[in-house]
Image: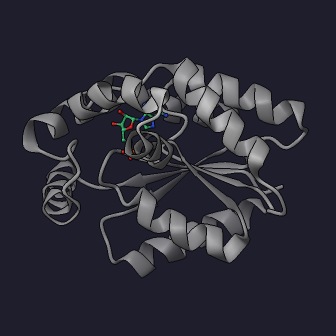
Amino acid sequence: MLNIALFGPPGAGKGTQAKKIVEKYNLAHLSTGDMIRKEIAEGTELGKMAQDIINRGELLSDEFVVKLIESSMAACKGVDGFLFDGFPRTVAQAEILDRMLEAEGTPLRALICIHVPFEELKRRMLERAKIEGRADDNEEVIQKRFREYNDKTVHVANYYKNKGVHVDVEGNCPVEEVFGSITKAIEGVK
Ligand code: AMP
């Protein structure tokens, strides 16, 4: 199993790259953000609990997202691995993920970190707000999402650096170029 996590701040291009990666390597795309938005759109109990938190730009509880990830992983059949997108976002989530994957004997092979300068991230997110109309892409919420990233999420990169499975990728270039760097990184750990 080829288990990979895509990591980076909001607006780094994780979703765009994830679609290309899962197609090339036959992986299941596990995006916690997409799972939560689906729960909200379907009006489920989980969705109702998540809506205010996501619209404020805050992180949901580790317990909540781990439950989503667990049930999605269990439902995946016939894939060659998992691509985690937007997960793990805290060190606690990373520890839980590692325990789950190690129990299956298929640890995370790489945390691919996409790097993009802050001004470019902000520009991309405001652009996306116009196109997709996401409630969590307005200026105030974007600031909050960056604060959450800096307070809670950046530490995940160090956690995996210490485990020796962290790879840096330049993300401030055309989509195909970023994808080229990512596939090179994946080929290196396959
Ligand atoms: P994303 O689409 O990955 O940018 O996620 C959108 C929002 O969903 C985030 O701002 C959080 O509110 C929530 N979210 C997504 N993934 C996680 C996670 N792993 N842990 C906590 N909250 C999450």
Taking the image as shown, residue 40 lies to the left or right of residue 25, namely: left
Residue placed most toward the observer, 34 or 107 = 34
Q: List x then y, in percent, for residue 151.
A: 32, 22
Figure quadrant of residue 153: top left
Figure quadrant of residue 139: top left
Which residue sits at x=67%, y=64%? 186
Which residue sits at x=58%, y=25%? 93
Taking the image as shown, residue 55 lies to the left or right of residue 94, namely: left
Which residue sits at x=54%, y=73%? 20
Residue placed most toward the observer, 10 or 49 = 49
Q: List x then y, in percent, for residue 123.
A: 13, 58
Q: What kind of colouring is applied to the model shown? A: one colour
Does 132 appear above or below 57? below
Residue placed most toward the observer, 60 or 106 = 60
State whether residue 164 appears in this view: no
Q: Residue furthest left?
A: 139
The quadrant of the picture occupied by the N terminus is: bottom right
